[in-house]
Amino acid sequence: MAGYSRLMGLDEVGTARALREHRAVTDALVAKHGGRIVKSMGDSVLLEFPSVVHAVECAVAVQAVMAERNQGVPEDRRMLFRIGINLGDILIEGDDILGDGVNVAARLEGIAEPGGICVSSSAYDQVRGKVAVEFVDLGEQRLKNIDRPVHVFAAKSKDHLGLVAPSALPSRPDERMPLPLPDKPSIAVLPFQNMSGDPEQEYFADGMVEEITTALSRFHWLFVIARTSTLAYKGRAVDLKQAGRELGVRYLLEGSVRKSGNRVRITGQLIDATTGAHLWADRFDGALENIFELQDRVASGVVGAIDPKLLAAEVARVKRKAPADLNAYDLFACNGLHIPVDGRES
């Protein structure tokens, strides 16, 4: 359940009661599709199905009924479920199930959109063309505490069943309405392009994006888009102004990775998405002997270089605005009072 802690903080008794009422309906759907409730853990449930097709059909039915039950409920009070589905070996201990197959399902749930479903490629191969759902290919993902990358697919409803599709993965980019810009500076790190032709470097490029996104998120004066929201742009040409409008950000960071022997070169460019202007560009070279150390060094270098560029661009932008249009952040930036130090505000 997405946002369970927040809802409990707002209304503990009401949230617990609503969850029990929802579970009475969804548990019946699980039984109808041949599933077994292995265990409940407060805001989450572990289920086992004899068939992947039944598991996906049940997941779609659960999301559809939850969409109906959320109608008329204020958006900040809605209960939305995330569902992850995996086909894999399990270990049985009494009534419990354990093992890598369960762990992958749990991690898939963690990257699913609220109201959405993510499935592994092993599950996708079994249900493709057999259920009333279409899938969006999210590519190979690095999941927490899972050694190998997992190829992930996100489910989208074909028949308006109420299933929430990933917000950053429309059927066509032009179907997305432009998002309003936040008051404070906003940035998204687009997937880095693998220029080496070596498929293994895809993992390095994805890891590089994740490290830079994480480093940027430590600056509280920045609004940073999560990496999962930019995956829609992986492997395709991007109109940077359009991407900025779709993601609701003023700045975009794009880059590439190129490998030669044991050496790798990473380039990065900072773009003002509202104008298309390049604000900064640089390259970083290193050896692949210690890949994590290299990623940390490049991420620190990129963030350290673009931080002053972003701040200078923001001050210049604010100074171009009419006094009547300034918001609270603009006034701080314009008067030079907002100085980020080591990722903290001062």
Image (spheres, rainbow, N blue to C red):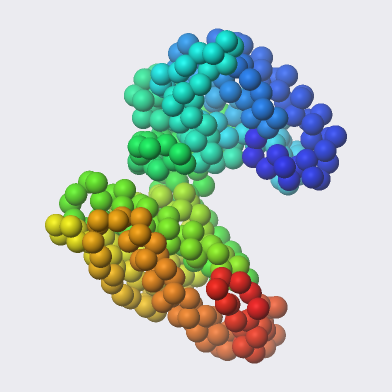
Depicted 98 relative to depicted 286: above or below: above
Q: Residue furthest left?
A: 261
x, y percentage for residue 70?
A: 71, 35
Residue at image coords 15%, 59%: 260
Tell me the quarter of the image containing the N terminus. top right
Depicted 70 relative to depicted 65: above or below: below
Pick whichever, 98 or 316, lies toward us: 98
Q: Is residue 245 visible?
A: no
Name which quarter of the figure residue 13 lies in: top right
Depicted 200 relative to depicted 285: above or below: above
x, y percentage for residue 337?
A: 65, 85
Residue at image coords 79%, 45%: 9
Residue 78 in the figure: left or right of residue 295: right
Residue 47 in the figure: left or right of residue 288: right
Q: How many marks?
A: 0
Residue at image coords 73%, 19%: 24
x, y percentage for residue 54?
A: 49, 15
Residue 204 in the figure: left or right of residue 107: left
x, y percentage for residue 85?
A: 48, 27
Pick whichever, 14 or 232, lies toward us: 14
Pick whichever, 178 or 207, lies toward us: 207
Q: Is residue 93 visible?
A: yes
Residue at image coords 42%, 37%: 146
Q: Residue furthest right?
A: 13
Tell me the quarter of the image containing the C terminus. bottom right
